[in-house]
Image: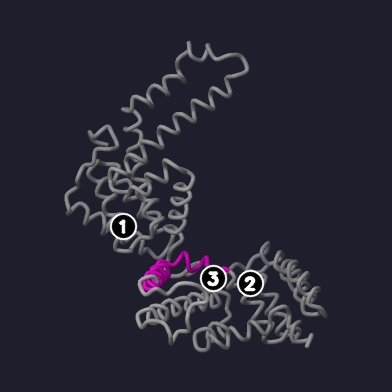
Amino acid sequence: MSSSPTTPDIVVRPHPKRIARAKDWLTRAIRSRTPEQTERRIDVILDWAYRSVANAEAIYAAVQELRDLRELEPDEAACLCGEVYEIRSDRFMTHDSACQRILALYTDASVIEGVPPGKFESWLVATTAALRSRGVELAATYHAARGEARWAAMLRTNPGEFQTLVAHGQCRLIKTGELIWEDEPLEAPDPEQTALIGQRIMALSASETLRAAFDISRVFQHTIESSDRASGVAAVRQLREVGAISRAEWASLIDEIVVSDLRSAIECDREMMQRERELEDAKEANGVTGWPEPDDDMLPADVRVLKKRYLQRSLAIQATLLRRVGEHELANLVMEHPEEYDRLVEEGAFGGIAERQR
């Protein structure tokens, strides 16, 4: 990296054209259709940021602008800006007198020899903690100087919280595509797992009491969570083909296996998260609070419109998850008659035990 400021509080203002170029590259990266393409493009951008201070500052400013435009989620912005800081952190620590004093302790033979017997490990832990604490303060100073007071406060009071935010942002950046699993082929079912899941389903369907159904359901859920989706779907499909389970039970079981990850899929879909935030902002602006919320016909017009857009996208993701495992009948039902889909899934829950108990 070329000559640059040696303290994190000095901000080099990049040229607007450089920021525009960074925004263009970042936009292409976050709109990539595969995680591999996203990761590859972000690596190129960070390599460009490493080449000069002006480039690094341009990336930081571009990320802030894209977040404000809601092209980036807050955790994604924290992740990218954190990466930019890491590119420059070595230089800051090299020229920081406090860091250098702590680092000198590691190589000062007289200091090391002066550590009392049996205390070296605790001395090493304390010295490392002091160095880490100083590094956190430098990072907080860097972000605060660039207008990110919230990140700075988070680093100073609870560094782990900021690291969690960055980790969530990294996951979202790399996993986000048009829809989750869009390019992920369904693995082949495992015959042993398929048979095991089938046995659990038959035990659940044969239960005669709600208590027994609940206990077996817990075992079934554990089996599903420790198996792959393909084996679960294959087991349910086989049982339906031989008439061992009803249509409602089939729908409910497929829903439990596939759509139980709907929230994760929503959180990995950039468009969905933007619609959710817009909806929440509109509710707050119109004073729509509490639960349950009013019926749709009682909601303000703009909230109704945004809620409809949100639900449409949610249903599209739900249908996509079902189509990924070949359940086109259920996917079509979700898109064309979502109320009927919900009714069918509810009817088949617990193997229809509640219905049989009447």
- Residue beneath disc 2: 257
**How crowded is the residue under tag 3: few (<14 C-alpha within 10 Å), some, or many (20+)?**
some
Q: In the visual, does 335 lie left or right of 211?
A: left
- Residue beneath disc 3: 262
Task: Describe the element under mark 2 as helix, strand or loop.
Answer: helix
Compared to 296, does 226 lie above or below? above
Q: Nearer the viewer, residue 146 or 254?
A: 146
Of the numbered discs 3 and 1, the one sitting upstream in the chain is 1
Q: Nearer the viewer, residue 63 or 192?
A: 63
Q: Nearer the viewer, mark 3 or mark 2?
A: 3
Q: In the visual, does 6 lie left or right of 117?
A: left
Task: Describe the element under mark 1 as helix, strand or loop.
Answer: helix
Residue kind at label 3, given as amino acid type: Leu
Q: In the visual, does 147 lie left or right of 106?
A: left
Label annotation for residue 26: 1
Magenta stretch containing residue 278, yes or no? yes
Residue kind at label 2, given as amino acid type: Ile
